[in-house]
Image (cartoon, rainbow, N blue to C red):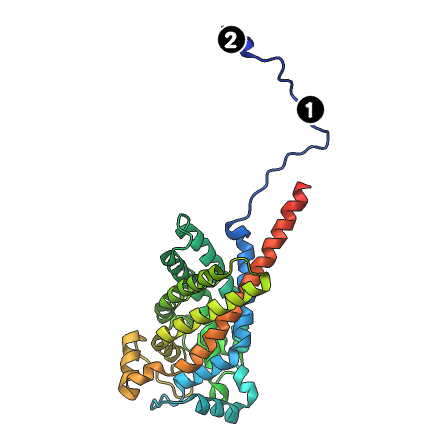
């Protein structure tokens, strides 16, 4: 019966068309979010992070000196005094002391940072692509992951930035000495503070950046590629400056924890944030929590502009590469 019914409904005019001998059907896997693969986000982010931190490293050195200089007893130090102190004791090369540690840490950390951000942004804002809460939450997840990679090298970098008074000859000497004298935990002494600082920093930063970028592109959505880079740089600078201003007190605490016991800096027994805050306020008042705010903003505004424009340029490169690759497969 089944055979009879099948024959009944079979149409003889539907003749299968034979495929050419060289026909090979191919299953293509579409790239991930934003037209890029995960590894491409990592490369673009790594390059952006290294360019950003290398370009702005002297400002970062001045900020570190301002936040620890004269910590026994703590006294306020201005931008000019910190710069003069560095040039007098170490010369112009002192502005770049510790840049090797930055080079080792910034690339991998930013690879993690941007790739996690892009993946989380896609997951959190799938239904609402312009949701600032999703952007902020994605930024928080990104910084928790990247700070786990970057914090040890950041500690080494800051100890070397203390200049000729620092007891370390270089990056590897610092790593070896700290491991021997203080143990592995010293590399993560400021991790909790770093997370508490960078979580609001990245939440403000990414939400502001996405909103500013959307607003600027909304004014003229059909602008050329070079002009888009200007938009990314402008939005990044605004986001970096605002986020830096909001989180300066916690950055002071982080620097104190990372440089404790070096060059006369105070050592904290339990390493708690409250203990450090109490010590700073007791010695220098509440203004001590804002030490280094000017070079911090001077660092993060142009640094974010450099980072975002470089990152977006990297993304554009990979998007074109993926587009050309798909076109070649179709021909």
Q: Quadrant of residue 80?
A: bottom left
Compared to residue 5, the image places residue 161 above or below, namely below
Circle 2 Cα neighbour tier, 10 Å, few/some/many (<14 / 14–19 / ≥20): few
Identify which residue is drawn at 58% across, 61% down: 224
Q: Which of the two residues, 197 or 126, is positioned nearer the viewer here?
A: 126
Q: Quadrant of residue 247?
A: bottom left
Q: Position of residue 110 (x, y in %)?
A: 50, 65
Q: Which of the two residues, 66 or 183, is positioned nearer the viewer here?
A: 66
Along the polypeptide, which appears first: circle 1 or circle 2?
Answer: 2
Q: Quadrant of residue 312?
A: bottom right
**Could you give the CA–CA distance between mark 1 and mark 2, rounded to whole angstroms?**
27 Å
**Quadrant in which the C terminus appears:** top right
Query: What numbered label is drawn on residue 18?
Result: 1
Residue at far right of view: 21
Is residue 176 left or right of 324 when viewed as pictured?
Answer: left
Query: What numbered label is drawn on residue 262?
Result: none
């Amino acid at each position: 019966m089944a055979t009879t019914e099948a024959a009944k409904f079979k149409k003889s005019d539907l003749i299968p068309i034979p495929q050419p001998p060289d026909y090979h059907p191919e299953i293509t896997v579409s790239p991930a979010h934003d037209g890029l693969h995960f590894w491409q986000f990592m490369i673009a982010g790594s390059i952006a992070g290294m360019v950003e931190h290398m370009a702005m490293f002297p400002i970062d050195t001045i900020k570190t000196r301002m936040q620890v200089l004269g910590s026994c007893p703590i006294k306020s130090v201005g931008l000019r005094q910190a710069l003069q102190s560095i040039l007098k004791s170490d010369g112009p090369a002192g502005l770049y002391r510790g840049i090797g540690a930055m080079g080792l840490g910034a690339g991998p950390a930013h690879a993690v940072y941007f790739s996690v951000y892009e993946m989380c942004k896609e997951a959190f804002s799938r239904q609402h692509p312009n949701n600032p809460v999703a952007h902020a939450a994605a930024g928080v997840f990104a910084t928790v992951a990247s700070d786990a990679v970057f914090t040890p090298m950041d500690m080494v970098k800051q100890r070397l930035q203390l200049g000729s008074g620092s007891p370390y000859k270089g990056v590897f000497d610092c790593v070896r000495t700290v491991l021997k004298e203080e143990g592995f935990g010293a590399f993560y002494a400021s991790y909790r503070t770093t997370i508490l600082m960078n979580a609001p920093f990245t939440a403000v930063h990414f939400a502001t950046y996405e909103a500013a970028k959307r607003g600027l592109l909304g004014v003229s959505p059909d602008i050329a590629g070079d002009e888009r880079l200007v938009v990314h740089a402008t939005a990044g600078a605004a986001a970096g400056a605002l986020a830096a201003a909001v989180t300066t007190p916690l950055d002071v605490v982080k620097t104190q924890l990372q440089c404790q016991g070096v060059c006369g800096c105070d050592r904290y027994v339990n390493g708690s944030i409250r203990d450090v805050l109490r010590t700073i306020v007791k010695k220098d008042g509440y203004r001590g929590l804002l030490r280094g705010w000017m070079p911090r903003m001077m660092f993060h505004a142009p640094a974010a502009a450099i980072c975002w424009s470089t990152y977006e340029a990297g993304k554009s490169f990979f998007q074109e590469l993926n587009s050309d690759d798909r076109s070649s497969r179709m021909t």
